[in-house]
Amino acid sequence: MRKNVLAAGAVAMAGALALTACSSGGADEGTVVGDGEGVELTFMYRGSDYDKAAYETAITAFTEETGATVKMIITDADQYSTKLQAAIAGGNVPDVFYVDPANMMGYVYADVLADLTDLVPQETVDNLWSFGVDAYRFNVETGARGQEGDPFYALPKDVGPFAFGYNTVLFDEAGLDYPDPSEPMTFDEFVELCKALTLDTDGDGELDQWGTGLNVTWNSQAFIWGAGADWISDDKKTVTVDTPEFAEALQWFADLGLVEGVTPSVEQAQTLDTYQRWMAGEIGFFPVAPWDIATYNAVAEENPDEFGYAMIPYPVANEGDDWSTWLGSLGIGVSAQSENVELAAKLAEYLSTDLDAQKTLAAGQIQIPNLIDYAEGDWITTDATETGWPENSQIFLDIAMEKGRPLPATYTYTPEWYDNFWIGIENVVDNGSVTAEDFLADKQEEMQKLLDQSWTSAEAAKAQG
Amino acid sequence: METSAPTAETSVWSKEDRKASRKANAKLHRKEYGWAAAFMAAPVIGWVVFLLFPMAFSIYASFTNWNGIGNMTFIGLDNYTRLLQDQYFWKALYNTVFYMIGIPIGLALSLLLALALSRKIRGRTFFRTVYYIPVISSLAAIAILWQWAYNGDFGLVNQALALVGIEGPNWLADPVWAKPAIIIMTVWKGLGYSMLLYLAAVQAVPRSLYEAAALDGANGWKRFTKITWPMVRPVTFFLVVTNIIGGSMIFTEINIMTSTGGPSFSTASLVWYVWNQAFRNLSMGYATAMALVLGILVLIVTAIQFRMNAKNDFSID
């Protein structure tokens, strides 16, 4: 009996030691860069085989320099945030991990994310897209996000510019001139082109080709911004959806289907979603993002008679207006509880900026390079074309540099206020039973309440740590 | 007949022997008791660690402002007052209760099927298998298939309706039809399980009862209402209780078929809303309060059911 108790105790102790080892490597405190022999860092992420290959390249370089090894923990995309939260609750946070800019504030307040400002060299930061770093800047005192000069808590895994594109084959068939790749169309010009592309091509009395087919939740932002409207004020404290320009832009977006008839119906879009229809050569205009390039290229190669694509700026309400679109990002953060914060920060730097890793990711058509000097130099002049990126990929760089904006909820503590906007939106865009103006008048109050609540929660999280 | 008590002299066991035997027995018992305690400890420890502690923890968490990551701050009943004013909580609760409409429908259908398949008909085993397949199929896969079936344009459901001249709605995109669509799917999914239990219950009804009823001139309906239905009542009770508990936790179907809570929040269930608040909106304390309210509601409903069942209990003499 005594032996059994001892054995059980030994097993429990071994388990506890194993768990401790998982969380922290095994080096003494105060390990500095270049002295990582015997240290094992953990890196948790989600992604594709290309990400893995690129990270292996970066990690090899990191290990060569520091001597530290890295254990990679890969999870399913849809389980990532739950798993990370469980790891945090269990006090077993990986040394380095992906972090979404939209929910990083809670992690900073809870002292889960380390401040990287003094751990990453300034020249490294200067060579990254400003949004790639600004997205992780956070002033804990004021609650402000994205402000240059504030501390940053992650480096970009990537930036995701969401460009607009058109099917070149459909333009050729209709005898239309291609849109200008450098100047945005106006809304009116866009509608005219959409009408010209909306056709019954087989003469059976039913439309089988449409000007566009845009999902309101993911594709309306650029149009709302292009009309000078926005969901939220600059200080992120006021919901601004009740302005006339917002209502006008949303109604215009809804009318693409309801009045102009240049989009597939709701039922048709359900039968085959517009993404599939776009690749089947049935849609004229559709968004193009870096992660789509590999698929679009394969489709264009397979069906050159139906599909070819090029990229353009998003349309704007009036001639001369500035265009913009949303720019996403995913970050690589460092655990504030790591026993090797400096080494972990170095690893994050490698994962974010190692040139060979960036070349692997760009060649795999996963993302545009994070490094400005490479992106604007060798990549855009030679590497991009050689690795199958479309000719006018410069537009991705333009978005990363100046035309991109974060989604409205990225810089607020919680996204509930923004999620609320989409509840009932089908009554405006799908069936037209409510006008945009009426919808927005009711929405503003409700969203404002949730935004206020978000700020209250942020204050509470700040106070309780 | 003479009997005499054994004396110390006549006993085959000496005092020392008995002492040694008691000692050996005590040692053996101690060992056995030790093992018994160890075996009993496993579930008890499991219960304490995985049920009692989380339950106590969540009760406390429901009174706190907690984002699931940082520290907790005690805020008294704030989460509960917030819940009372949260229209989406009430809507999600209403949707969850609405989904329960599927329970009597499912039970009626599965009892009918059980009655049909308890008869000696051709292909009985085949049909039993067919009806049971959805039960063992992946819920995620089923949800995706039904999503296609409910497509407003070319979905199987509307194609079938078109055959009889009915123009079906755009099921999952219509606030009116989205909930019934989910109910139909859940009824279909649960039919096989309920049918199997009913089948066992129906087959266990003593034949003599039917024979006696037939001799008394009872028709088929009377035999069903007076014999079959009361005899399968324990199964009905079990199914109602488990279906209400299971139905109150509906999540996967909602999250896959209508990932944003459906048109105008018409399909969002309470567990879906709880999950959304906990993991998307970092309101773990509030989410816990909602989960507790749901748990208490289910407990009350189940207690009422048990009480009603006890009242109507009967036994065959």
Image (cartoon, rainbow, N blue to C red):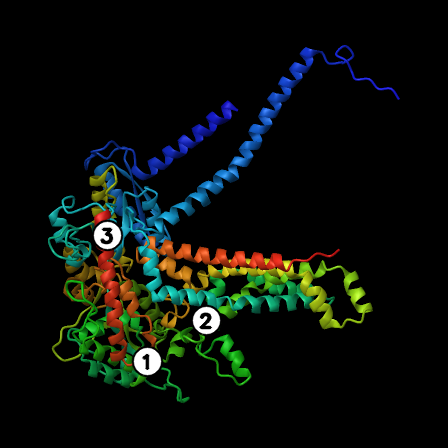
| Residue A29 seen anywhere in this rendered image of the structure | yes
Which residue has dot 1 on it? A263
Tell me which label, 1 or 3, sits earlier in the chain: 1
Q: Mark 1, chain letter? A: A
| Residue B122 seen anywhere in this rendered image of the structure | no
User: Which residue lies most toward the right here?
Assistant: B1
At x 13%, y 80%, the residue is A319
Give how far apart the Cα atoms at labels 1 and 3 are: 45 Å
Decide: few, some or many residues near mark 1? Use Cα within 10 Å; few <14, some 14-19, many ≥20: many
Secondary structure at numbered mark 1: loop
- Tag 3: residue type? Ala
Q: Position of residue A120 (x, y in %)?
A: 16, 46
Please give left or right for residue B19 compared with residue A128 in the image: right
Q: Nearer the viewer, mark 1 or mark 3?
A: 3
Q: Nearer the viewer, residue B53 or A387?
A: B53
Give how far apart the Cα atoms at labels 1 and 2 are: 27 Å
Please give left or right for residue B219 compared with residue B99 in the image: right
Residues at marks 1 and 2, common chain? no
Q: Nearer the viewer, mark 3 or mark 2?
A: 3
In the rendered view, tell whether residue A370 sits above or below residue A340.
Answer: below
Secondary structure at numbered mark 2: helix
Which residue has dot 3 on it? A460
- Tag 1: residue type? Thr
Q: How many marks?
A: 3
Q: Mark 2, chain letter? A: B
Which residue has dot 2 on it? B179
In the rendered view, tell whether residue A106 sits above or below residue B255.
Answer: above
| Numbered mark located on residue A216 in the image | none
In the rendered view, tell whether residue A390 sits above or below residue A57.
Answer: below
Secondary structure at numbered mark 3: helix
Q: Position of residue A10 (x, y in %)?
A: 43, 28
Q: Position of residue A157 (x, y in %)?
A: 24, 53
